[in-house]
Amino acid sequence: MAKKPIYIFISGGVISGLGKGITAASVSLLLKSAGFKVAPIKCDAYINIDAGTIRPQEHGEVFVCDDGIETDQDLGHYERFLDISLSRVNYLTTGQVYQEVIRKERAFEYNGEDVEVVPYVPEEMIRRFKLAGEKSKADFVIIEIGGTVGEYQNVLFIEANRILKLREKEGVLHLHVAYLPTPPSIGEMKSKPVQTSVRILNETGIQPDFIVGRSEKPMDDRRKDRLAFFCNIEKENIISNPDLDFVYELPLVLEEQGLAEKILKKSGLKPKENADLKDWRKMVKKVKEIESKGKPLKIGMVGKYQKVGDYLLSDSYVSVVEAIKHACWHLGRKPEIVWVESELLEKGKKPEEILNDLAAVIIPGGFGSRGTQGMIKAISWTREKKIPYLGLCYGMQMATIEIARNLLGLKLANTIENDPKTPCPVIRLMSEQEKKMLARDYGGTMRLGSWPCRLQEGTISADCYQQKIIYERHRHRFEFNNQYREAFEKAGIVVAGTTTDNKIVEIIELPKDKHPYFVGVQFHPEFQSRFLKPHPLFLGLIRSAILEK
């Protein structure tokens, strides 16, 4: 009989945005390094079936897995730390759970029982947790519960934790991440918010096994003593998680405090392998040196989802940001990301006023017409001034429009997404998407997930990948219009990558002798960049930026 996995629930307290996802990713990496298989799961409390229909300003980046599930950005953290590909079994929303419970009720799978929220909803959650463990043959299932304790939205996930703990007796642990503020007017780290948070957690029937204290500075013994006493927990199981220069340091900080060893002890296990983070530690050391003494490299991000009110929210493009960092660090340069609001260019700002000092420019994914004329101006600038450019999904489509207008003379060229009546639809709606759009069938119906792409030999992209066939993740409804393909190629534009049947244009480039690095891709390479394995296209962009600057 197969051994049951250990379930580790991770909850948050006091405030949101503490880094539960980074904590879950770090714990998973430590256990993986000790020789165990891990299956991380993100639980989101909203009724949405997935993250695909949520505004990025509202919830951050939509991260797409190989199988096409549109998820929370925390799955991106899991993949970047663990260097694995996840799937829909690693992502759970309240909407998915209610949908399945209602389906079962309609199919008479509850045999005439009156179906109540408890226990049927938590039971369905538990079934999904076990499914993720079975699919991965995991020794540990790491379950991150979104939000903070005390919110009514996530109480059913916590109830699933309670029921599973009651049923299993052993093999279910709980790690609570909570905030210890240091008010400037007081100048002392305060533990009361964590005490209150743990008390609220206790009221749900959960006693945490570990507390991870998030704070500006490392937690001192005085604070640990008070938390141990008032939260009914061993002092050695209170872990300090102070602010760090970059998130990839956290596994080493947790390792120094023996967190993985303590989890294994509570689980009655010993490491299968000598926990070795040698490569990770080496890279962290390199990054620290680069960040303190390295030469900055300015990379412009021209987008429209990064600003909300007076605040800059880089979470809308977190995978792109991390991919830039990975490539810069790998090549020994300090990344300096310059955020450019595309609407500023649209409203009259000249490109030279904003883009002149940049070593490279990226236009990431997006939807809709807002800010697009500013994006096109930025692309014209990079093309004419030979500034390395990488267009991601929407950034490829905007590059197509810019080239059509300014090199092919099609001044009214556009995407039908933004101008359905354009006489020059160089970007069109994919044929299989037309009925879906008419029926307003938006959720989970785009071209999603990993698709193969054949590269043309001798192109910039082929040089970067050093492969003939690649697999990249997609999230789009619109595509390059093949009616214009011949005209583009006659104008010298290189179709560097297509689907294996040659029907969909996946990559366009300017020739190597015309531009050092001008690449637009219909997919999202940023989703497959890793801390220890930067993505080839980002490496190519940064190499070119270094040479040109």
Image (tube, rainbow, N blue to C red):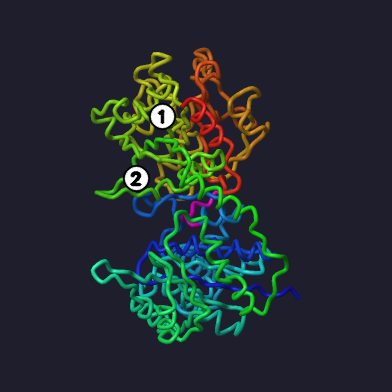
Q: Position of residue 202 (x, y in %)?
A: 42, 83
Residue 371 drawn above or below residue 2? above
Q: Position of residue 83 (x, y in %)?
A: 61, 52
Residue 70 lies in the magenta-colored region: yes
* Residue farthest along the right direction in this orientation: 1
Residue underneath mark 2: 306
Count of numbered tags: 2
115 relative position to 32: left or right? left
Q: Which mark is residue 490?
A: none
Q: Position of residue 54 (x, y in %)?
A: 38, 52
Amino acid tagged 2:
Gln
Residue 222 lies in the magenta-colored region: no
Q: Residue at x 54, y 18 (%)?
A: 511
Q: Which mark is residue 398?
A: 1
Quarter of the figure that contains the N terminus: bottom right
Q: Residue at x 60, y 54 (%)?
A: 280
The residue tagged with tag 2: helix, strand or loop? loop
Q: Which residues are magenta?
A: 68-74
Q: Residue at x 54, y 66 (%)?
A: 254
Q: Position of residue 194 (x, y in %)?
A: 38, 76
Query: Relative to the observer, which residue lies in front, 15 or 242?
Result: 242
350 relative position to 522: left or right? left
Quarter holding residue 345: top left
Crowd around label 2: few <14 · some 14–19 · many ≥20 (10 Å): many
Amino acid tagged 1:
Met
